Amino acid sequence: MAGRTVSGGDAPAPEATGGRHRRLTIILVLVVLGFFGFGFALVPLYNTFCKLTGLNGKTGGPVGASAVAALKPNDSRTVKVGFTSTVMPGLNWTFKPLHEHMMVHPGTVTSTSYLVSNPSDHPETGQAIMSVVPGRAARYFKKLQCFCFHQETLKAGQFRNMKLVYFISSGIPKDISSIIVSYAFFPVKKHT
Amino acid sequence: MNAAHAHDAHHDEHPRGISRWLFTTNHKDIGRLYIGFSVIMFLVGGVLAMLIRTELLRPTLMIPPEIYNQIITVHGLVMVFAAVMPATTGLANYLIPMMIGAPDMALPRLNNWGFWLLPPAALLLVMPFFLMLFGIGNGAIDTGWTMYAPLSVQGGMGVDFAIFAIYLMAMSSLLSSINVIVTIFNMRAPGMSMMKMPVFVWSWLITAFLLIAVFPPLVAGVTMLFADRHFGTHFFNAAGGGDPVLWEHLFWFFGHPEVYILLLPTAGILPHILSTFSRKPIYGYKAQVYSFWAIGALSVVVWAHHMFTSGMPVGAQLYFMYSTMAISIPVAILFFCWFATIWQGSMTFETPMLFALGYIVLFGVGGLTGLVLSDAVADQQYHNSYFLVAHFHYALFGGPVMGIIAATYYYLPKITGRMFNETVGKWHFWQTMVGFNLTFIPQFFLGIAGMPRRIPDYALQFAHLNMLSSIGAYILGSAQLLLVYNLIQVMRGVGKKATAQVWEGARGLEFTVPSPPPYHTFETQPVVQ
């Protein structure tokens, strides 16, 4: 079979053509690899973007004690914070917030808890994921203590009081008068 | 065969039998393989479409819902990846070297590889159907062609088959895109500057750039999906802190430019056909080239208009709404140029011209209904309804498929050396137009009335329009057999011999070589004035 198909009067010598082809091909393959990498880079980029903007209600990790020291409570404002709970299929737990909703002043550290029990006859492991609605408010909801994103195992019949300590930072936009904090417990499948 | 030595006496020498096709590095052979493969897969996808419309003929369940889900998914994947994309790639392989006066593609061995990755990919897509018949697995991928997480994370082994099919198809597309770019940059005949290239070549150059930009992120996405399914990662798994919406972003970052990857090559071939049959030069060459660039650039920044109902902030919805609407400007310029090309021309209505005009009408409807959907407020109502189904069939059948059929009829005499049966061609056109509109106009009304897509059954109030739509689908489906008849006839050598120019008004380097062209063309490069 013909390895090289370029020939004829006016065409450049085959070696020169092959070199030009090779150079451009290598550049294009690098572009492809670059965009392949970009696909993966989108994961951290997307997460950062969500944390910055509160897209999808992502709140960012727990804040340290130093943040609390700097707090200035704003008693002139009250924000209504509602709590919801969901148990995803595959988990047999009961899961309820202690308070359906609370009235809090921005900048005031508040604590509440969720009541979790495992009425089934075998131990189960779950992991809670939380989000905040509206997404705009997510980055003003600061957690000091939370049971989310940790695996929690409940023995058969065990009851637990899972604590949540939080505050709402005083920078929260004026037009937001109520937010909803949503917790969902997902079953954790052990990969063997 | 020894192309390096340009023996005029052995011009048409090539291996015979199966080895000719398996090992060929000849751009015309590979182009024909692509087109043949695409016709076969078009029929496979068409049979699946007929099954969908049969299920929806009456408000009752004939096909089990899980099988129905597999049928709609594989119909979509086959039509997009195995029918339309190979068809435009085949046209590129066959035409680009001839249009720019090159003897072959720049990377012929890669070209052979690019094609032969496709049949295994198609096999991977449909094989789970047959494995299920033998009691292995639970059938093909059933998530819809968008493969949204978490459904695709939980799905059966059909999803894995589809992931590997996407790997092969991506590899194939990327190889042929690289080949197209290198060919266009390095192998133009002396005197053919970039701004003298035929419009079709320009449209493919931009298509190739889009492909190498957006296919790799999809490959990255399905790799994450595969890892989520089998290696316990949590890219899309909310339970582990992942985010299913991330998949939607990754998919549509590929999926929206993909629409233009399907469309642009046919928008590039259209002016050639319109100009030939109205016997006027192409109007607005530069405007069309710049519009292609504008469409290509805009297409990668508007993807989330597919996700208006995914809970985006208002600001993001506004951005994606306005940027999407902005695409209608370069597209409108293309329409204007098409109209201006045929304006006051001495038009004749041979089959390719009919399909080209049909393209303008149907794709026009697809574009205008797209403007309705791009409205972030209206989309809350129309999202995932049959309005959307009708819209993208007008855009994807009315555009790419009509364009590919027009190009096939236009170049068939050039490729085979025989004129096809014009009467059958005209019947094919009119039956396609009647069938297509009868299928999809009722779906606009069904969508507005609230019928959701991807559901195998529906409320009784939708019965009459669905019946009409199904009858239209049977007309449309059977019309394509006329195309198959014409293809078989010219391949058997039936029909009048075609001249080198084929059509009275045809221009371009490809119409300076005999029909059919010799196995090797332009071994001595032509010089463009």
Image (cartoon, coloured by chain):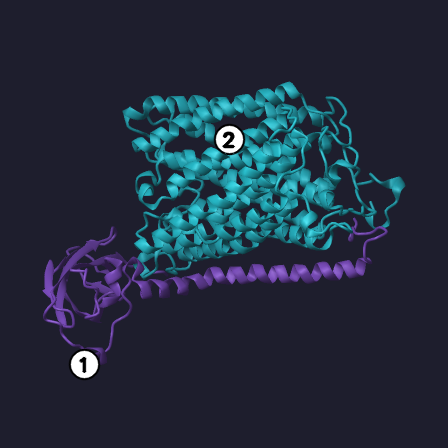
Residue under label 2: B361
The chain that hosts pointer 1 is A
Residue type at mark 2 is Val
Q: Of A76 and B161, which appears nearest the observer?
A: A76
| Image coordinates for residue B481, horizontal then vertical, percent | 57, 24
Q: Dot 2: within a 10 Å radius of its alpha carbon, few (fewer than 14), some, or many (20 or more) residues?
A: some
The chain coloured cyan in the image: B
Examine the rendered structure and indicate whether residue B26 appears above or below residue B56. below
Does residue B461 appear left or right of residue B307 in this picture? Answer: left
Residue B1's tag is: none
Residue under label 1: A69
Q: Of B257 and B321, which appears nearest the observer?
A: B321
The chain that hosts pointer 2 is B
Residue found 57% across the figure and 40% down from its top: B267
- Circles 1 and 2, Cβ within 8 Å, touching? The answer is no
Does the image show residue B81? no
**Do the residues at pointers 1 and 2 share their chain?**
no
Say which element carries label 2: helix
| Image coordinates for residue B98, horizontal then vertical, percent | 73, 42
Examine the rendered structure and indicate whether residue B437 appears above or below residue B144. above
Does the image show residue B331? yes
| Image coordinates for residue B503, horizontal then vertical, percent | 71, 29
Q: Dot 1: within a 10 Å radius of its alpha carbon, few (fewer than 14), some, or many (20 or more) residues?
A: few
Image quadrant where residue A45 sits:
bottom left
Residue found 56% across the figure and 29% down from its top: B357
- Of the chain colours in the picture, the one used for chain A is purple
Q: Of B501 and A168, which appears nearest the observer?
A: B501
